[in-house]
Image (tube, coloured by chain):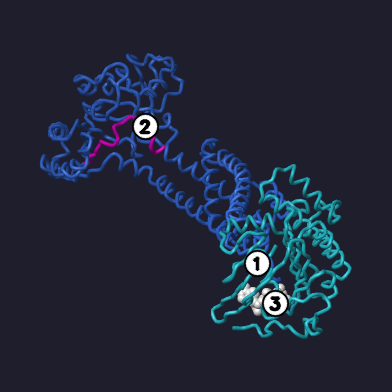
Chain colours: A blue, B cyan
Amino acid sequence: MELGPIFRALMYNKSRFWLITLEVALTLAIVANCVNLLLDTRREFLRDTGLDEPNLLVISTTPFDDAFDEDDFVHALEEEDLRRLRSTPGVVDAMAIQQIPLSGGGSATGRRPIDAPPESEGTGMPYFRVSDHALQTLGVELTAGRDFAEGDFEEREEGSENELGRNVILTQAAADALFPDGGAVGQQIQNSGGEIVDVVVGVVRKMHNSWPRSEFAANGEVVMLKPGSPGSAERMRYMVRSEPGAIDSLYTEVEALMLQTQSGRVVDVQTLTEYKEDYYSDALVMIKMLTSVVVLLLVVTALGIVGLTSFSVTQRTRQIGTRRALGATRTDIVRYFLIENWMITGIGIVIGIVLTYGLNYALVQYADVPTIEWTFLIGGALAMWLTGILAAVAPALRASTVAPEIATRSV
Amino acid sequence: MINMQNIQKIYRTEHVETHALSGFNLNIGSGEFVSLMGPSGSGKTTLLNVAGLLDAFDGGSYILDGEDVSRLNDRQMSRIRNEKIGFIFQSFNLIPDLNVFDNVDVPLRYRGLAAGARRERIEEALEIVGLTSRISHYPAQLSGGQQQRVAVARAVVGTPKLILADEPTGNLDSAMANEIMDLLEKINDLGTTVVIVTHDPELATRSPRQIYLLDGRLVDLEKDERPAPLYNPVENGTADNGMSA
Ligand SMILES: Nc1ncnc2c1ncn2[C@@H]1O[C@H](COP(=O)(O)OP(=O)(O)OP(=O)(O)O)[C@@H](O)[C@H]1O
Ligand SMILES: [Mg+2]
């Protein structure tokens, strides 16, 4: 190996490498930070929602018939819709719900323990009004207390005390926010005015609310499920949990099924994933754009290395001929240029790592970007190094075709 | 040392075939010091290229140091160039990015010697050419004569049996040219065969044997037998003098 002379020659004539080195360094810094951002967004998009997301279908119906103005009509229809949905082959369970998790649109209120001092701040509490079978349909896991029972859904008499209070189920995050010391089940919680008092009867492990991208409500994990008939004259919504693999056929069937049960309404069917993709659409577009930028940048860098290496090979045609005359084989020449490139790229990568951290530091300060992990940086450096070597192969091979007789050609 | 029989060397371009060497025979014994002269375009460099395995030839046989080198692959030819031959070029051909030490080191690197052995040889070779004090200088920091002396050190560092020099003094003034000739004589005295191309009859007379090339053919004359006109390359040789297809 002739690492020493190759390195010394590079150090003597730095003009040969600083352009490629700079290119590699900048590319690494930009690509590493782009990929970091991209993976972070992707991780955020793919994080556990606590729901049986891939198997959930959302049916949203908008009535246009006057019949829907009657509360009794809506409630009766809701029960009939659910009965028919649940008896459809391929359906695990179905529920009515007034807002859609992961969709960006929802309702929130505030709650605090009943014995908390009145001036204490309550907990921001996103909530969903749900029919029975909610846990089974959503696929959330009950970890303490009990599921809703039949009595929990009964409406209280109008004008009675605590008319709007219910037995509710909280997510673990909501229970932790209200009762940091634990023991949420059985506790009473009230709204800021104190006129609504709910009782916590159960806790589920995890469920994302309507705004999982927001830091509000523990990054979307604080949820209260409140039993009651969620349908109204404006809108009736259902969620349907399908058996694995059945969602596509259900997707096409349920509209007809709904209209068959009751016409006079517009039925819109979407998967929960579609709602989520909609809510994340700008992030998903950014992922696509960043991916294209990264690929393009790598291609441009590779082409740059090919060009600059070709140029530096051409510049040294005579030197190559001389080396061949002095006993270098073709393999020696290829090896020379690959090693040289490896060093040039290596220096670029070292500088690039420093730049990457610098850029990342700035991004962490001014934007919502995580710190780059070192394992990840090693991956980026390896990719850069591989790109460099691959880009140098063609010029190095061309160098090896320089004939030894070039050495004696008069200048 | 060099035994060529009926060597053909034809340069083919799209439109012309140049018979640079045709039916060429040459015998150079071990330890000889030979000057190669002839007008421009007569094939001197071509001959040196063929003799030094820098270029393939199209016909005939070539025995170098007792070894048939007519049909060798690239790796074998590289090894012979590295171990048996030392080259000196008109424009020195030092590697500008390497210092004197690393320049002289180049052929040894391709031989895969250990660092200690290489250092010893390099210092010895630089001693011979008297440039020990310039060991860390770069070519750009040396005069032409000094550069060529480095090139001589590079040529002898691997202790080759044959030194091939193509107009080694062509870019030097006469004082420096004589210095280089002194060096080559010294190396020849140590037993190395030396073949040198020169346009300078004065320098050529310093070697015991001169060979004249004319249109790719050999006119081998002992000293004092040379016909006067061949002395002057300017009169006899322009580049296109009789050389064509
Ligand atoms: N690579 C080449 N391609 C085509 N023709 C060539 C090539 N090299 C040499 N020739 C031709 O071969 C002939 C001999 O050239 P060569 O270089 O051997 O001459 P020379 O005696 O060294 O001349 P000079 O004294 O000018 O260096 C010339 O006619 C030249 O044009
Ligand atoms: Mg010549």
Mark 1 touches mark 2? (CB < 8 Å): no
Label 3 neighbour load within 10 Å: few <14, some 14-19, many 20+: many
Instruction: Verify whether residue B242 appears in magenta.
Output: no
Within 10 angstroms of label 2, few (less than 14), some, or many (20 or more) residues? Answer: few
Q: Position of residue B122 (x, y in %)?
A: 78, 50
Give above or below for B244 relative to A199: below
Nearest to the observer: residue A313 or residue A249: A313
Foreground label between 1 and 2: 1
Badge 1 density bin: few <14, some 14–19, many ≥20, Cα 10 Å: many
Labels in figure, total: 3
Task: Identify the residue position indicated by label 2 in the image.
Answer: A48
Quadrant for residue A372, please give it: top right
> Disc 3 or disc 1, which is closer to the eye?
3
Q: State the image coordinates of residue B230 (x, y, percent, origin top left).
A: 78, 82
Q: Nearer the viewer, residue A160 or A367?
A: A367
Mark 3 and mark 1: Cα distance apart in space: 24 Å
Residue drawn where x is 73% and y is 60% of the image: B162
Find disc 1 in the rendering and name its residue: A406
Instruction: Identify which amino acid the numbered label 3 is placed on.
Output: Leu
Host chain of mark 1: A
Q: Amino acid at mark 1?
A: Ile
Chain of the residue under label 2: A
Q: Look at the image and give the residue range highlighted in magenta.
A: A44-60
For the C terminus of chain B, the image quarter is bottom right
Q: Residue at x 22, y 39 (%)?
A: A247
Q: Quadrant of ligand 1?
A: bottom right
Q: Which residue is mark 3?
A: B218
> Residue A314 appears in which quarter of the rendering?
bottom right
Q: Is residue A282 left or right of residue B106?
A: left
A361 left or right, relative to B223: left
